[in-house]
Image (cartoon, grey):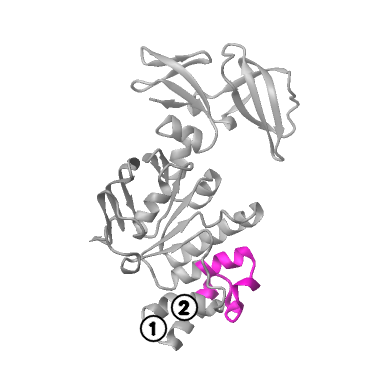
């Protein structure tokens, strides 16, 4: 499939500080791409370059085959939803949604009709004549989304749009965002530092760290078989266990595992650790989280490692207990770094 967006060898500096280093990325039409990473990883800078708010120090941005690297935001086929929504408080919701169409010279009757239709898509048809202060945070977020989508961008950019919402509303809006994206078919590029949000929304996740892409692909692959140690720890939790190669095996304090090529560590997800087996460990912490218990334990054979386990909620374990663990070699993640 021909890429809708091609980011080619982008680097960027703020003064002497290099915040992006040789980043290349392809975004497919109709995809939901999430740029995931900690603060300072470069994800917001990359989004700003894609939206035209920054010109990169090096590299170029192609959208629909056109070089948009130095085009102003208004001249490229993108629209942006910001975390603070940036709605005009003195305007009605209908006028807010139709503002971009007004700037394009669309006649009043047509832009009002388009605004009403888009508000219907986001579930706010009845809010056309209201003012922003009359809506909840989640509703204002949907208005901002409608305002961006009504101009029919090729790519919609979302800069941590759910960051200001409480947990329950954030999860509700995740479902709504995904449903709206599927309905309109526009490619979304969404920045977040929340790995649960990334997995809930993305069909293409891009893990960033220190201005570089650590891993990218379908969230199931990035979570199940992360390419790097950083990706294994940021995209969900993992226990990282150091090892050394020996005749096609990586030998660790908790066992040996087949490795195709050189490897330096193995990782195991907490949901793949269960009671039983021959790994003796002392429980140091138990956190009840409703549907499961998050258990931290120190293996006798590797006292410098904290082994994480996600056990059934009814598991009878408490701090200080000696337990036996086992994990399936099929779920071991082999890491080269």
Q: Is residue 249 above or below residue 97?
A: above
Please state if 123 lies on the left or on the right of 105 as rendered.
Answer: right
Indicate the quadrant where residue 32 lies: bottom left
Snapshot quadrant of residue 155: bottom left
Q: Which residue is mark 1?
A: 106
Q: Which residue lies at the image location 40% right of the left edge and 56% below the top edge?
A: 31
| In the depicted structure, whether residue 243 falls above or below residue 234 | above
Magenta range:
118-144
- For label 2, the residue is 98
- Where does residue 131 sit, x and y in percent of width and height? 60, 76
Residue at position x 40%, y 73% in the image: 151
CB atoms of marks 1 and 2 within 8 Å = yes
Report x, y in % for residue 43.
42, 47
Q: Residue at x 62, y 28 (%)?
A: 309
Please tell me how crowded label 1 is: few (under 14), some (14-19), or many (20+) other residues with Cα within 10 Å. some
Q: Quadrant of the N terminus?
A: bottom left
Q: Report how many numbered discs are placed on residues in the image.
A: 2
Q: Is residue 166 above or below residue 108?
A: above
Task: Name the residue rendered at 53%, 73% in the picture.
Answer: 88
Choose between 124 and 323: the one closer to the eye: 124
Between 159 and 313, the residue placed more toward the observer is: 159
Q: Quadrant of residue 4?
A: bottom left
Mark 1 lies on a secondary structure that is loop
Q: Was residue 52 drawn as part of the magenta stretch in this picture? A: no
Cα distance between the residues tagged 1 and 2: 9 Å
Between 169 and 313, the one lying in front of the other is: 169
């Amino acid at each position: 499939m021909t890429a809708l967006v091609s980011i080619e060898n982008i680097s960027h500096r703020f003064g002497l500080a290099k915040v992006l280093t040789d980043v290349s990325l392809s975004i497919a039409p109709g995809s939901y791409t999430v740029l995931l990473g900690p603060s300072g990883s470069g994800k917001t800078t990359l989004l700003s370059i894609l939206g035209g708010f920054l010109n990169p120090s090096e590299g170029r941005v192609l959208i629909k085959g056109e070089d948009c690297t130095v085009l102003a935001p208004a001249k490229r086929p993108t629209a942006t939803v910001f975390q603070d929504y940036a709605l005009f408080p003195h305007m009605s919701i209908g006028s807010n949604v139709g503002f971009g169409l007004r700037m394009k010279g669309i006649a009043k009757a047509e832009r009002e009709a388009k605004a009403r239709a888009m508000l219907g898509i986001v579930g706010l048809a009845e809010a056309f004549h209201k003012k922003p202060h009359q809506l909840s945070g989640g509703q204002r977020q949907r208005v901002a989304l409608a305002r961006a989508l009504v101009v029919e961008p090729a790519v919609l950019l979302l800069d941590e749009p759910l960051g200001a919402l409480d947990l329950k509303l954030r999860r509700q809006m995740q479902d709504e965002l995904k449903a709206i994206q599927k309905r309109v078919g526009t490619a979304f590029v969404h920045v977040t530092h929340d790995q649960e949000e990334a997995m809930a929304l993305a069909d293409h996740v891009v893990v960033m760290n220190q201005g570089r892409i650590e891993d990218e692909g379908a969230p199931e692959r990035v979570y199940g078989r992360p390419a790097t140690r950083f990706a294994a720890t940021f995209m969900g939790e993992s226990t990282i266990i150091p090892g050394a190669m020996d005749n096609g095996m990586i030998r660790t304090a908790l066992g040996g595992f087949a490795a195709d090529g050189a490897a330096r560590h193995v990782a195991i997800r907490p949901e793949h650790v269960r009671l039983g087996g021959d790994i003796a460990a002392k429980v140091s912490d138990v956190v009840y989280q409703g549907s499961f218990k998050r258990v931290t334990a120190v293996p006798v054979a590797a006292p410098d490692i904290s082994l994480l386990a996600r056990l059934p909620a009814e598991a009878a374990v408490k701090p200080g207990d000696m337990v036996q663990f086992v994990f399936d070699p099929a779920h071991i993640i082999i890491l080269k770094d």
